[in-house]
Amino acid sequence: MRIAIAHCQGRVSPVFDFSNDIYLIDIQDGREVHREVRGLISRDPFQRAREIMMLGAEVLICGALSRHMHMALAGAGIKTEGFICGDTEDVISAFLQGTLDDGRLLMPGCSVGRSRRRCRNRRGRG
């Protein structure tokens, strides 16, 4: 499996739509076997989703992302684990251990509901 993590200076980038770099991490038998850094070129949601898809990532772990970006990634067959924050090493470890959704790495204002993450926005809607 190959995952992508949007990052900046050792932390998950706060907004994927404006991230410049991703880690591509290959996972085999529950452990990391290879990692590389790749720059992203396009800001267009559909082109960016295509970039991620062409790099072979199955899952994207990121901070916030726009609805258009989420739809473009879903259309490209890429699962998103959004609204994650923190040190990238902690995020990788949590992903490998299956604890990414335990709440400690969710962005402030986000919680885990029965079937999905929920985040408050600035206007107070859910």
Image (cartoon, helix red, strand yellow):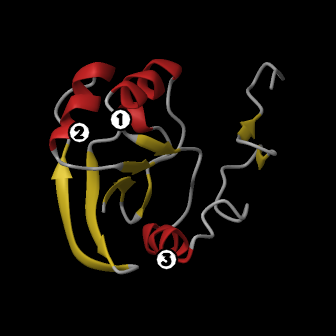
Residue 64 image position (x, y, % from top left):
54, 38
Above or below for 110 versus 48? below
Assign a secondary structure to mark 1: loop
The amino acid at mark 1 is Gly
- What separation in Å lies between label 1 and label 3 (alpha carbons)? 24 Å
**Residue at image point 45% right, 70% down:** 92
Q: How far apart are marks 2 and 1 (CA)?
A: 8 Å
Say above or below: 46 vs 120.
Answer: above
Reading the image, the residue beneath label 2 is: 53
> Camera-side residue: 89 or 71?
71
Q: Can residue 88 be seen?
A: yes
Which of discs 2 and 3 lies nearer the camera? The answer is 2
Where does residue 87 sit, x and y in percent of width and height?
A: 49, 68
Mark closer to the chain start, 1 or 3: 1
Are circles 2 and 1 on residues that touch, CB within 8 Å? yes
In front: label 1 or label 3: 1
Secondary structure of residue under mark 2: helix
Residue shown at 72% from the left, 65% from the top:
102
**Which quadrant holds the N terminus?**
bottom left
Instruction: Give whichever of 1, 24 is nearer the camera.
Output: 1
- Asked if the residue at tag 3 contacts the one at tag 2, i.e. Cβ–Cβ closer than 8 Å, the answer is no
In the picture, residue 8 is in which quadrant? Answer: bottom left
Q: Name the amino acid type tagged 2.
A: Met
Q: In the rendered structure, find residue 77 and report the number of the disc placed on it.
A: 1
The answer to whether residue 44 is visible is no
Q: Mark 3 belongs to which amino acid?
A: Ser
Q: Could you say where residue 126 lies in the image, as x and y percent from the top left? A: 80, 26
Which one is nearer the viewer's eye here, 59 or 64? 59
